[in-house]
Amino acid sequence: MGKHKAWSSRIALPLSIAVSFLASFPAPSQTPAAPSSTPTSAPDQQPHGQVIFSRSTDDSGQTTTTAGPAAPKTSGQTVSTPVATDAEREALTFTAFDMDVHLRPVAQQIDVRALLTVRNDGHTPLAHIPLQISSSLDWETIRLAGHDLVFTVATLNSDVDHTGQLHEAAIALATPLAPGATLQLDVTYSGSIPQSAQRLITIGTPGDAALHTDWDSIAVDFTGLRGFGNVVWYPASSVPVILGDGARVFDEMGEHKLRMAGAHFRLHLTDEFPHGQAPTVALINGHLVPLALTEPSTAGPEVAGIATSSLDEPALGFEAPSLFLAVRTAHQATNTALYTIPEDDFAVEGWASAASFVTPFLQSWLGQTPRSQLTILDLPDPDDAPFETGPLLVTAIHQGTPDELDGVFAHALTHAWMCTSTSSPPAWLGEGVAHFMGTLWIEKQQGRKKAFESLESGRSALALGEPASPGESPGQPLAQAISPVYYRTKATYVFWMLRDLAGDAALSAALRAYSPAEDAAQGLGPAAGSDYFEKLIEQAGLRRDLTWFFSDWVDADKGLPDIAIDSVFPSHTEGDNWLVAVNLSNSGYAAAEIPVTVSNADASVTQRVIVPARGKATQRILIEGQPTRVQANDGTVPETDASIHIRNLDGAGIDSSSQPAAVQQ
Ligand SMILES: [Zn+2]
């Protein structure tokens, strides 16, 4: 176990980066499409919901799958050198998925027919369409307008899949796809998805620890397919990346989610389960979907039952499509459904009481009723690394202290408030608000100091990630951020600052009025902005203009401010009153409104001042009694270096040093 922990802190944590909030918890781990210049689809290629698989088993027990009526099983030509280029892989955007997924968990088998709409987002015509799936799956047919296409299949080394490899089909188009044009492809593929820890073993991870991170597989009791970054069970297009090459795998995962945002995603699931072992819970993209079961009671145990389910998600949020199906026992808690394995039933009470304890606090900020319900799905093994997507938390349900569990629920339930049953917000409003509520919960339970410590613990990583000057690199504007350090850490600071700028009531009203579906209608993905949320705050009765704030902190990445107290001039006015002039400068490229506090042993006066980017500001503060101390910023505004500046004044109330201000972390 000791070995696991040491390993997991190095490697499992980045992999389960979406759930780093659980790290303190004793979990072992770790615009519309341009008109098409190419025919998109023949009438008979329109999406339809019928089951399109037929299966036959021959005398030797060999099962064959046929997709579509009388479609011959073809496969691409295997090539050793990939045909598609990185430029082609990067240009392809998936705008719609209509998938028929057939699972046969006894054989760990998946058979898929998918209607895919792809768009060329590059600047030059696309000669090849690259489509990638996990290397444990095989391409069968790829059709365009009712005709089979000729394609090649290459095996790529890429750690965005647990096998460390992808099967990439490259379709050579007779007429290259023009920039902005779309194409609808009708594809079939199949194979088995057993657990694989190949990519982690390759970089030296011990086998059992690796399997607790890479737990994706199809099995009777538990099918978990997390999507791109873990198992590529739906077609994708990406530049090959390997673990150990810095953060490139994680950046590619973020890039994938951002590119997928706004895509229409429809899935129809058919699961052939063994007699008596019907699944009890199904989740598609983190959304709980009802299961319809057909289990012939008169037939013998050799006859499989059929479970079906479906989801139509008009626009994906910042998410990799995922699929979960399991045999679990359902428990209802406040705004939460827990699905457990028998060994973990004993822990449910503690989890349920945390859900009910935290709920009133979340109601006070986010509204009486969450937009969806939180689902917590128990992982097969207590050491399995947790995962979250939308309003779903997949984790081993084990015993925790009330404080630990309350913290988990403050975060996880916020996702249920921000997601609906078919839509999820962009990352900065999903993960950002969840993390923000987590820190507000710390403030409520343990005080402001502890909450600031929690904020400060992420600031140095943010400061490192930010461009030193906006000219140096474009950075990551929040609404299009792909890295957690932005959409979690920076977004959390942004909500803390909005709280100070707009007030609790206005921020709370905006969060209550927020609709992820309306946000999606305004455009998600690489072209996303924050206009919708900014309007919600303004509509909350705000009497000030926050345009400067959104343009410096959300819609562009201008790095962090760098505030200094340049000088302090106290002057004795009348009686015991002092007027203190505080001269401030900001050598960063983002404007900031900071609190400035002048104090002495008996009194303290705080005023807020905007220090412009690359500029200066002077604040005059009146205080009773001789001032002894000036403080600028209290930690709510993240800066490149320390986020609190203190200047002590000497006995005569005079700025005691020409040295840089004492800095206190
Ligand atoms: Zn989260």
Image (cartoon, rainbow, N blue to C red):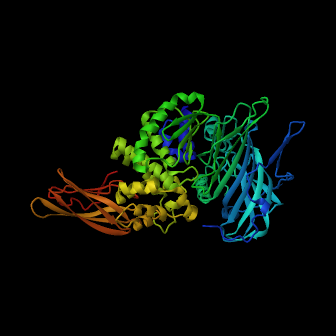
Residue at (9% x, 60% y) in the render? 575
Residue at (71% x, 30% y) in the render? 276
Left or right: 509 as drawn, with respect to 268: left
- Residue 25, compared with residue 470, is above or below; it is above
Residue 89 percent coordinates (x, y) = 69, 61
Image quarter in which the N terminus is found: top right
Residue 165 percent coordinates (x, y) = 71, 49
Q: Nearer the viewer, residue 237 or 307?
A: 307
Residue 236 visible in image: no
Residue at (40% x, 56% y) in the render? 507
Left or right: 264 as drawn, with respect to 444: right
Residue 324 visible in image: yes
Q: Nearer the viewer, residue 650 or 414?
A: 414
Residue at the outermost left position: 575
Residue 176 percent coordinates (x, y) = 76, 69
Residue 488 percent coordinates (x, y) = 48, 52
Residue at the outermost front position: 298
Q: Nearer the viewer, residue 312 or 61?
A: 312
Occupied quadrant, residue 526: bottom right
Q: How many marks?
A: 0
Residue at the outermost right position: 59
Left or right: 370 as drawn, with respect to 506: right
Left or right: 617 as drawn, with respect to 475: left
